[in-house]
Image (cartoon, helix red, strand yellow):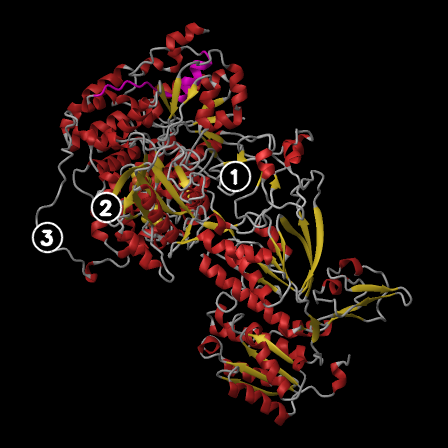
Amino acid sequence: MTSTKQNGEVRIGYFVCHCGHNIGATIDVLKVADVIKNLPGVVISREYKYMCSDPGQEMIQEDIKEHNLNRIVVAACSPLLHENTFRRATEKAGINQYYFHMVNIRENASWVHVDKAEATRKAIDLSRAAIQRVFFHQALEKKQVSINPNVLVVGGGISGIHAALTLAKAGKKVYLVERDPTIGGLMAKFDKTFPTLDCAACILTPKMTEVKNHPNIELMTYSEVEKVSGFVGQYKATIKRKPRYIKEDVCVGCLDCIDACIYKDGKYYDEFNVGLSKRKPVYIPFPQATPQLVVFDPEACVRLKRGKCKETCVEKCDRDAIDFDQKEKFEEIEIGSVIVATGFQIFDAKKIPYYGYGKYQNVYNALEIERLVNSSGPTGGQVVMRNGEVPKKIGIIHCVGSRDEKTNIWCSRVCCTYSVKLAHLLKELSGADVYNFYIDMRTPGKGQEEFYNQVMREGVHFIRGRVAEVTDWAAEKEEQGKLIIRVEDTLIGVVRRIPVDMVVLGVGVEPHSDADKIRRLFNISCSTEGFYLEKHPKLAPFDTASDGVYIAGGCQGPKDITDAVAQAGAAAAEALALIDKGFIEMEPNTAFISEDNCSGCKSCIPLCPYTAISFDEEVFKAKINEVLCKGCGTCVAACPSAAIDQNLFTNDQIYNEIDGLLKYEIV
Amino acid sequence: MKYIYYPGCSLKSTGRPYEESLLAVFKELQIPMEELHDWNCCGATSYMSVDELKAFGLAARNLALAESQNGINGNGDPDVHIVAPCSACYLVLIKTERYLKEYKNERKAVIKGLKTIGLDYNGKAVIRHPVDVLFNDIGLESIAKHIKKPLKGIKVASYYGCQMIRPFELFDPVHYPVTLDLLVDKLGATPLDWPLKTRCCGGSLTGTLHEAGMRLNYRLLSEAKKRGADMIITTCPLCQFNLECYQDRISSYTGKKIEMPILYFTQLVGLALGIPEKKLGIHRSFIRFPNFQALEMEV
Amino acid sequence: MTFSFLRTRKWKYQKPSRIEQDKTVRRRIKYESELDIGFREKIAKMAWGERLDSCMQCGTCSATCPVSHYMDYTPRRIIDMVRQGFKEEVLNSFTLWVCASCYSCTVECPRGIKITDVMYALKREAIKQGFHPKRFLIPMLASKFYKQVLRHGRQNEGRLILSLYLSANPLLLLRNSKLAFRLWRRGRMKLFEKGIRNKASIRKLLSSIERREEEPVQ
Ligand code: SF4
Ligand code: SF4
């Protein structure tokens, strides 16, 4: 590595950008250029309206050639936006791109200050720091890392299924990990989908079967990602396989064991029917479950709980597929990229006590209604309430756990249209009078407003007002024995009490309660509400700040099936682009050890999260593997002998930058 | 620690039974408490409607007095716990304490005013409701130890009212408070689960917007009755007054006879502790609970 | 909504089944020039910098309010009218005075607006600007209360109601005389109360606390 000082004379070109009014309105750009011009080493100092434009870039290139510049500093916007633009321009003019440095005077100065004089001073300080820094820049080359073409898809809901199928069809090997015993996710529980009223199962199950049968997909259900290590192109993941107590390769899904179980009737909470029915300790989530394998619930099965049972199921199974000695297994897989599609959960309506969920038996949440109206649901599609009656009047409350500072402040995006859909289905199936209570009706998206209009014409009542309370105290005779909804009809301006038989809560969606745990495995950041954060809200909604990790579907934010599928496709395409390129270029920000200073104390070795440091016992010095080093800087800070330095962030560079920043003059 | 008792105006007149029973119960449970010297009216809702800052001043005078009245606890910290049984006073004092803590300008103005009458306020006083004291400081278990006459067989609707639990969530959940019900249960009686336990009784509206006030109270009374309550217990003199004293009028308006005893929760506790009725001010009620005698017989 | 409760024969206050309707034809339009633009700001400041702007007009406050059915404008409408500068309508409205300060709305509002504090601010503003309806008991009670406490340091319920009804409508006294008697017999009413010892201190304290409402809340 050559030191800059040996490169002879340093000739700096400084370019400051107005960015139209973005910078120009708050920072006196002319003055900045003027002050910088007089600093040592600066050969030329210019300002320009838009540095990133073609003429701006050409200006830099011409100046490099004409003035024989060998360092370039551009003061403009965030390096995230245009660092690459200027690096390319620098390289085109024939000097190494790492002789270029960028100063952010937009996000860091003009956009965050109002005082023009102060902002200008800050811009000068930041620029001076950069000028002093580039003296010590070096010519560096980007690293190349090859990409493992296998992909891990986390989550087997509709997003995960779609992403996995897309990748598999392109010939890539996919590991699809799902924590439940079956894939299908929330969508499998839905009855019809809005706004077209397609049967959810009819459009989903063919895709589930395709996943199961695709030779490129390795389906790992009832499994969880336990640990992830490595970096883009070279990830390693440990998958925990929970025991089903069934030999997966032997069981054919005949379900004889379920019939044979000592429990004659179901007794335990049925996850698939959200508690509207009961299941046995051995069960299959639903008839089309994929894979077609039964599961033993260790909390419920007598044999697993107490170690003793008549084991009628084992007797019955003529293939000998039941194995009560199964244990948790861990499998390690190697992949190059990851798509996280873990979805969302519905809001727990018990958190809003005044809606009576869990207190009054005829108050339901929307997911329960999806099962209730489903022809293969617990009542065979009959709208019968928990008390055995058919409702004559139904109230559907929107925005439960949405748009509320006390619970979740965001709009859940799907509830308005699904509530309209449930109104339609409930009315159709039970003939009841249906009232929808909404704050604002939000039916964006293709065909949704038309659907809303259609349901209005079917005679469903729409009342604008947020329900204050669902209660059972009657103010008059007609209200006796009913659930009374108290609401202001805001369009009329009067408070109403509407007695109904059944209340449906249009619950919103929120991040899974353990979203944080999964997020940390993959180093994904999240927004304040806990949804996974995309790299750019407009232009990269499927990408994350971790290279090679993409997100799709409900884990990124509330969305409907249409959008989830679109995002999953985009994430898969993005992964394909990465894989098919075959390698990626990485910043040469690796750490290096100056052997003269290394005392061989080995403090750095256990600290490296990427195990990039080894120890050469012969010379008694530590050594850093450049390919493995991710440039996190941990060892640099930890070395007691200050023997480690890091490219792009050498001590010389940083100290001089600080020094420049502190040369604070009254200007 | 000694509690400082801030009665407020109502407990000296319409709410006399509340004061009598509160003092008797505290004495029985050996909770030391002394009355705040020369306390003044808290200002209630009316003062806030006329001049908020003065309302704070008025309330703060009591807080300042309490601070000067109580000494220093073992750790050298000021230890001032004001017990305000009237829910309206309770809320006004708490609101004053909170807002003066939050808003500098107002705090300065109030403290300046207090200085002119030789008082100082440093925000140390803690305002407590007797329900809070009994529930959290004394504890249901140790109350249970004092019970002489368990109140078997009566169904009690606890009425929390507004100001004790709203808007600040202090010791009970705002939407579904439970402390009184747990207390009732401990006393041996059956708590009634009813949805109107926090619905407003109208406060001073019974005197000013008569129809509205009557109707609010009618709702509360009839709902409690419908659900089989033998009595309603309250935590506030105004709630008690509203619920009790207009029953004959409500009956004559509606043509339905309503006779629902309205007790202070302290009276109920007192009965269970075996304190004589007279000492609890039960004889001052308009509507007598027919079984009190029977209760005493039982043990 | 029907008032079955009122249909019973003896309720004397209001014929419930009759829907009150203003039968006169009236021109209703609001010109921008009639609005008070600064009203929103002023009330927001008086109500401790409350963020009225974020109200989404959901009506939870009105629906949860135990007395909104006596209001001429529901709390939700008051909030919007304040924002839009409908000063006269708001300050003239019964709503402010019907509000029982029960805080139901404040704890329910999904946008965290302290509506009760807004109502208090409006009451103060209405009193200051002389807007409140004449001979309307509620604001009268507030000011009688105010004066009594200023004078005695404490309030006496009996005397307060006595003086209120005397100046508003002596008939009310008659109606409540039985109640008063019953209270007195049970020792629950006194017409004379000592007040606090140091009465002058209250006056001194209150006169030294003056805040001009326009002053910004910090
Ligand atoms: S509850 Fe809050 S947001 Fe809703 S209308 Fe009332 S003030 Fe506005
Ligand atoms: S505080 Fe006033 S406006 Fe709010 S709910 Fe209570 S009475 Fe209604």
Name the foreground residue: B298 vs B80. Answer: B298
In the rendered image, residues at marks 1 and 2 fall on the same chain: no
As drawn, the residue found furthest toward the top would be: B297
| Kind of residue sitting beneath label 2 | Tyr
In the rendered view, does A591 fall on the left or right side of C143?
right
Task: Give the residue at x 67% y 42%.
Answer: A321
Which mark identifies residue A270?
A: 1
In the rendered image, residues at marks 1 and 3 fall on the same chain: no
Which mark identifies residue C26?
A: 3
| Kind of residue sitting beneath label 3 | Arg
- Where is B206 relative to A554, above or below? above
Identify the subunit bearing mark 1. Answer: A
Residue A207 appears at what percent x and percent y? 52, 57
Identify the subunit bearing mark 3. Answer: C
Residue A108 appears at what percent x and percent y? 54, 70
Residue A346 appears at what percent x and percent y? 48, 47
Task: Please give the residue where the numbered disc 2 appears in the rendered image.
Answer: C73
Mark whose residue sits in front, 1 or 2: 1
Task: Give the residue at x 46% y 36%.
Answer: B170
Instruction: Quote the CA–CA distance across marks 1 and 3.
Output: 62 Å
Tell me if I can see residue A535 in this picture. Answer: no
Which corner quadrant of the image does residue A471 belong to? top left
